[in-house]
Image: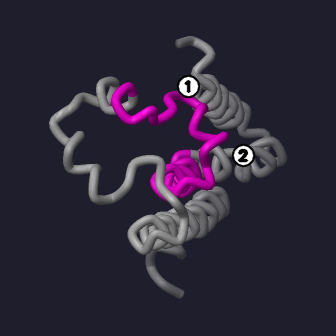
Amino acid sequence: MPENIKYSSPEQLRYARIMSIGVKIGFSLLVISFTLYMTGVLKPLVPVDQVSHYWSLSAAEYAKATGTPTGWGWVKDVVKGDIFNYVGIVVLAAVSIVSSLAVLPLFARQGERALLIISILLILVLLVSASNILH
């Protein structure tokens, strides 16, 4: 048995297993979306040959100049080659929420109230942050 597994709790192993799967999925989506963008399989919002014209702009200026959606507005344009990469980014951002959700039953079953409450609060903070409702 590897040394790190011998000293890891079931909660740590579950969290790490789900985190590992989520990161692999997110990274794979980033590679796929980049390939679809660069090959032109998915038509981009901003053509590849024009992107360099906007490099000197701030994010807000870039969004305004190119019509790139902000906030959750990207969802309606997800079929655009340069917007589809957001899916991989969202998966990477959400994997900590999913991993935290996965250990909640273990904390509850073991009576680990402090860890359960901390995990629930962490999930709530991440969800509120991602939702942009406090914008």
Q: Residue at image x 81%, y 48%?
A: 105
Residue 101, which numbered label?
2
Few, some or many C-alpha atoms within 10 Å of disc 2 (few <14, some 14-19, many ≥20)?
some
* Residue type beneath disc 2: Leu
x and y percentages locating residue 92 in the rendered image: 52, 53
Q: Nearer the viewer, residue 113 or 91?
A: 91
The residue that mark 1 highlights is 129
**SS at circle 1:** helix
Q: Residue at image x 48%, y 84%?
A: 2
State the residue lying farthest toward the top. Answer: 134
Q: Residue at image x 50%, y 65%?
A: 33
Residue 54 vs 70, above or below: the answer is below
The secondary structure making up most of the magenta span is: helix
Single out the mark in the foreground, 2 or 1: 1
x and y percentages locating residue 8 in the rendered image: 54, 65
x and y percentages locating residue 131 in the rendered image: 63, 26
State the residue lying farthest toward the left. Answer: 56
- Between the C-alphas of marks 2 and 1, the distance is 16 Å
Q: Residue at image x 47%, y 55%?
A: 44
State the residue lying farthest toward the bottom. Answer: 1
* Mark 2 / mark 1, whichever is N-terminal: 2
Residue 28 in sight in this render: no
State the extent of the magenta-drawn residues as a range. 64-93
x and y percentages locating residue 32 in the rendered image: 51, 72
* Residue type beneath disc 1: Ser
